[in-house]
Image (cartoon, rainbow, N blue to C red):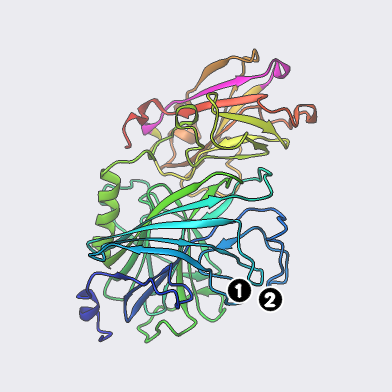
Amino acid sequence: MSSAAGDEAAAPAPAIAASAADRASAHLVQLCDNLAVCAAAASLIPCSDPDGKCSEPGGWGQPWPWNPIGSGDVYLHAAPILNVTIAPDNSSAVVWTRPLQWACDNVPCDCTFEQRIVLRGSAVEVQLTMHTDRADTTIYPAATQELPAVYVTGRFCHLWTFNGSDPFTGAALAEQPATWPWSSFTSGERWMAFTNASGYGVGVVSPFVGRWGAGFFNNGASGAFNCTPNGLGPYDSQTGYIAPWGTETIDARHNFTYAFALVLGQLDAIRAYAQQAHDAGSDDPLVPHYVFASRGDRAHCFTSDATDGGLPLGPGGLSLNVTGPHPFVSSPVTVFAPGAAPVLRVNASHDPALAGAESLVWFWRLGDNVEGSPCAACLLPMPVIADGAFHVYEFALASVPEYATAEAITRVAYQPLGAAAVDPGVYGRPGIVSVSSFTAPAAASRR
C-alpha cells in the first residue's frame, strides 16, 4: 500500500489479527501497512507478590510490581492465547489470554484477560475483563493503570486532544507536545490521537478516563519529537504512545472490566466518534455522581491512606479502614464547570470514636497538577456527626472563591477526618468511616 496520505485515508476497515503464531496477536490491530497499532492490556499493583517480584534486564534492574501484560514479557515470551472465537462475518471476536508478568522470565499471571472486540465502521471497540484469582489476597493501594497502552508507528507523530475547559462543545483543538519521557494530560473529552501531517491517524477513546499519558519515543532522546515528514514504519524503534491513565484498585478475587475504542480516520472523525460516545450516555458523568452503595463498586474512585473491604461493596458503600494520616476518597479526573456542580453532597457515617472531627472536600482546578496536592485554599471544611449513623453533608463549594472563579474543575476528593494527621489509634478499624456516595445535585444530567 502506498504511504501517501490520500491512500491511507482510503484504507479499508481494520481487521483483527488472531494468529497464535504472532507474539502479540491478541492485542495487535493491523490497520494498514503504514499504521500499526498495538493496544497492550496491562495492570499494575504496587505489591511484592511472589510471582511478580522480578528484576527486569536492560537497565531497569529493580524489583517490579505485580504487572501482568497481555502481549508477553520483557524476555519476548508471548502470552499464551487460550481461546479465540471469531464471528462468521469477521465483525467481532472474543479472545482469552493468560498474561505474563512483565519483568519476569516466562511467569504466567494468576489471572486471565477476556477481550470482546467489535468492528464498527472505522472503529475497533474493545471491552476487556481481567479475571483475577491472586493467591495473595491483600488489598493493595490504588495504582495508575494503562487502560490500555497504545503504540503507533513513528510516521504518526502529531499528538492531539482537547484539554480546554468546555469539553463536548466543539471548541478548538490544540496540538500537544509529544515528548520522551511520557507526559500527563487532562482530556475533558476523554480521547487522544496521533495523526500524520494530513490529520489522518488513530484515536483512542475511553468512556471514563480524564487523565492520560502520551508521548513519543525517539531512541531515548529526551524532549519533544520534531515531527517532520518521515518514513518511519512498524520495524523502526520510534513510536508514539497513548494511554488512558486510570487510578484503580485491583481486587485479588474479583473481575475488573473497562472499555475503549481505537478509531481510524481524520482527526475530526475521531473527535466526532468521542462526541457520539458521550452523547449515547453512560454511567460515568462529567460532574461528580458517585453512588457506591447502589452500584456495589468504586465507580472509578480511589482511596489513599485507607482501604475498603474489597468488592463487591456492602450496602453502606465504601467501608474504610484507615491506614495512614490523611485518608481520603477521590473522584477520577473529569473536567466540568464550577457552575455545573455548585454543591457537593456526601453521605457518610463516622464512628463515635471520632467525636469532634471535621471533614473536608478538596478540589483541583484546570491547570493544577491533578497528581499532586491541591492549592492550600482549595478546600471546604465541615464538622462531622460522629454517632455511627449516615448523614448527608452539603458542601457549598461555590462559596469558595478559588472554586467559583476557576476556569474548570478537574477532580474532587472527600477527606472524612480533616486536615490534621489522624490519631494512629483509629488505624486498622474497618468501617470507622463509611462513604455511601458523593454527588453533585446537578449530576442527574451527564453535562
| Mark 2 → mark 1, Cα distance in angstroms | 8 Å
x 27%, y 50%: residue: 275
- Residue 161 visible somewhere in the drawing: no
**Amino acid type shown at disc 2:** Pro
For residue 282, side relative to residue 318 (left or right): left
For residue 158, side relative to residue 134 (left or right): left
x 50%, y 70%: residue: 179
Mark 1 nearby-residue class (10 Å; few <14, some 14–19, many ≥20): some
Q: Farthest residue toward the top?
A: 387
Dot 2: element: loop
Residue, disc 2: 57
Mark earlier in primary sequence (2, 1): 2
Dot 1: element: loop
Residue 423 horizontal/vertical position (percent): 78, 28
| Residue 192 in the image: above or below residue 427 | below
Q: Magenta part of the protein: which range?
A: 339-357
- Residue 220 visible somewhere in the drawing: yes
Residue 397 horizontal/vertical position (percent): 48, 28
Does the CB distance between marks 2 and 1 fall below 8 Å?
A: yes
**Amino acid type shown at disc 1:** Val
Residue, disc 1: 74
Mark 2 nearby-residue class (10 Å; few <14, some 14–19, many ≥20): few
Q: Nearer the viewer, residue 435 or 165?
A: 435
Residue 356 within the magenta-colored segment of the rendering: yes
